[in-house]
């Protein structure tokens, strides 16, 4: 809360503000905090390595045919990603088409019927602490959906994918690779 921040500032503590909105911002944040802590060289190496890996992922998936993906961020109420949402930023690297990308806010609540009507090729249900949310939608109840017909439901690690740190690229690479395997199967059908 801002009141707490004001009290800390009055006590003479330096307050550092952080708000990475894009993947490229992670490298900027690394440099920022490295400079604040007197670890410029370490921070520069980490940031540079991050930028190189990010560029490699962009290059690897650029030009791939897009597949329609529904991202189940939260099951109740059913919430997905759009626009400038952090996971949307990440998923865009994998060349996905999000049917809800143009929603009014970055984390829209939607109806089950909207997902079924969108008929995604792939459904993403992130898991946390190694487990899928116990309230996650059981999409297999709708076998008419392409994602269900093609057994194309993936479960990335939300603890890595939803954190704005260097490890986001580990999970991004894994998700993009899994999407690419599914994309190849979809193209054959």
Image (cartoon, rainbow, N blue to C red):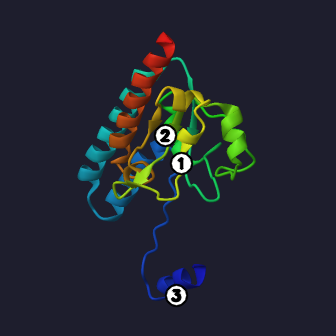
Residue at mark 3 to residue at mark 2: CA–CA distance: 36 Å
Say which element carries label 2. helix
Q: Which mark is residue 86?
A: 1
Separation (CA) of disc 1 from disc 2: 7 Å
Tag 3, which secondary structure? helix
Q: Residues within 10 Å of mark 3 (few under 14, many from 20)?
A: few
Residue 164 locus on image (x, y percent): 43, 52
Residue labelled with disc 3: 7
Contact (Cβ within 8 Å) of mark 1 with mark 2:
yes
98 w.r.t. 188: above or below: below
State how many labels appear.
3
- What residue do we see at 62% from left, 34% from top? 98
Residue ID at (44%, 29%):
179
Is residue 185 depicted above or below 89 in this figure?
A: above
The quadrant of the image that shows the N terminus is bottom right
Relative image position of residue 6 (x, y in whole percent):
55, 83
Q: Residues within 10 Å of mark 1 (few under 14, many from 20)?
A: many
Q: Position of residue 26 (x, y in %)?
A: 42, 48
Instruction: Describe residue 88's horizontal placement relative to residue 61 as left or right.
Output: right
User: Looking at the image, which is closer to me, 168 or 21?
Assistant: 168
**Marks 3, 2: nearer the viewer:** 2
């Amino acid at each position: 809360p801002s009141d707490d921040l004001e009290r800390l500032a009055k006590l003479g503590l330096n307050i550092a503000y952080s708000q990475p909105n894009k993947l490229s911002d992670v490298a900027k944040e690394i440099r920022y905090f490295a400079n604040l802590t007197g670890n410029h060289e370490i921070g520069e190496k980490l940031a540079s390595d991050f930028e190189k890996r990010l560029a490699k992922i962009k290059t690897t998936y650029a030009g791939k045919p897009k597949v329609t993906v529904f991202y189940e961020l939260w099951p109740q109420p059913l919430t997905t990603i759009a626009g400038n949402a952090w996971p949307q930023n990440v998923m865009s690297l994998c060349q996905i088409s999000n049917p809800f990308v143009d929603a009014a806010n970055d984390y829209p609540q939607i109806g089950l019927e909207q997902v079924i009507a969108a008929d995604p090729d792939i459904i993403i249900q992130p898991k946390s602490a190694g487990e899928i949310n116990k309230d996650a939608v059981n999409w297999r109840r709708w076998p008419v959906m392409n994602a269900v017909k093609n057994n194309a439901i993936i479960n990335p690690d939300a603890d890595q994918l939803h954190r704005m740190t260097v490890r986001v690229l580990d999970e991004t690479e894994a998700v993009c690779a899994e999407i690419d395997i599914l994309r190849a199967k979809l193209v054959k059908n």
